[in-house]
Amino acid sequence: MLTLISATPSPYARKVRITLAEKNIPFTLQTEVPWDSTTKTPQYNPLEKLPVLILENGKEAVYESRFILEYIEAKYPDTKSMLPPAEDVDARLFARKVEVLADGICDALVLLFFEKQRANPSKEWQARQLRKVDGGLAALAKWVEGRDYVVCDSFGLADVAAGSVLGYLRVRWPDHPWMERHPELKAYSDKLEERQSFKETVPSPQKISDKIV
Ligand SMILES: N[C@@H](CCC(=O)N[C@@H](CS)C(=O)NCC(=O)O)C(=O)O
């Protein structure tokens, strides 16, 4: 059986959990805090980040959410595909572009989260990251306008990635005005959160016990 090292607030890990659930691939969920000294993450990923997908042999692992999703898509061809048909090259590339943008918003949010905890947070650095978040959300809002799913009118990779970052915003950034600014994005996210795979993976904060250096 596969094992996924995951953290409850992680939008990156949620992408993998949603995908495994949508594809009905069984796995053991191993919940950790990647910043704590007890995490097993460095044993499998020299970059010390989760999610990490430990393969069935229990020894090898793949990491980096984007690559894990690619791995699952390639290795489990008999499961529901998260990508448009192979002949629709542009739709496939667009789905991946949406994932790049959604992950980039997550990256900026994570940087902001940790900057806020520093003794003297840099206003300029925070403004720069917030610009990326707001610019990314505005682009996402245009793509989802009037649609239930971003690509090809069916649920797939782009929605996994977009839905994960929007769910992360709800939990970690409840004061961010994205829902008022982009009602279409809120409607899209609300609809996604009704799916079973999303209900099973609603993010929640975690307590970091060790000091991060
Ligand atoms: N680009 C990576 C980002 C993963 C990531 O930043 N994970 C965080 C948890 S949400 C982590 O493990 N951070 C620990 C660290 O950066 O050392 C992915 O998509 O998997």
Image (cartoon, rainbow, N blue to C red):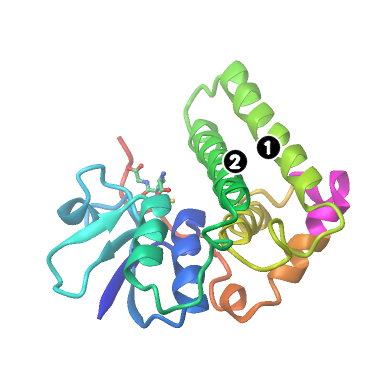
Instruction: Name the residue beneath numbered marker 1.
Output: 136
Query: Does residue 60 appear left or right of residue 138 in this picture?
Result: left
Q: Position of residue 136 (x, y in %)?
A: 68, 37
Query: Does residue 40 appear left or right of residue 158 in this picture?
Result: left
Location of residue 163 by image quarter: bottom right
Q: Residue furthest top?
A: 124
Q: Position of residue 31 (x, y in %)?
A: 35, 68
Nearer the observer, 115 or 156: 156
Q: CA distance from mark 2 to mark 1?
A: 6 Å
Sooner in the amino-acid sequence: mark 2 or mark 1: 2
Query: Does residue 112 appear left or right of residue 76 in this picture?
Result: right
**Mark 2: which amino acid?**
Leu
Q: Main secondary structure of the magenta part?
A: helix
Nearer the observer, 210 or 27: 27
The magenta segment is 176-186
Instruction: Name the residue beneath numbered marker 2.
Output: 101
Going 60% across and 28% down the picture, which residue do you hit? 129
Going 61% across and 16% down the picture, which residue do you hit? 124
Location of residue 41 by image quarter: bottom left
Q: Is residue 177 visible?
A: no
Label 1 neighbour load within 10 Å: few <14, some 14-19, many 20+: some
Q: Position of residue 56 (x, y in %)?
A: 20, 75
**Mark 1: which amino acid?**
Gly
Question: Quick check: 117 above or below 185?
Answer: above
Image quadrant where one finds the N terminus? bottom left
Q: Residue 171 in magenta?
A: no
Callouts 2 and 1 close, C-beta under 8 Å: yes
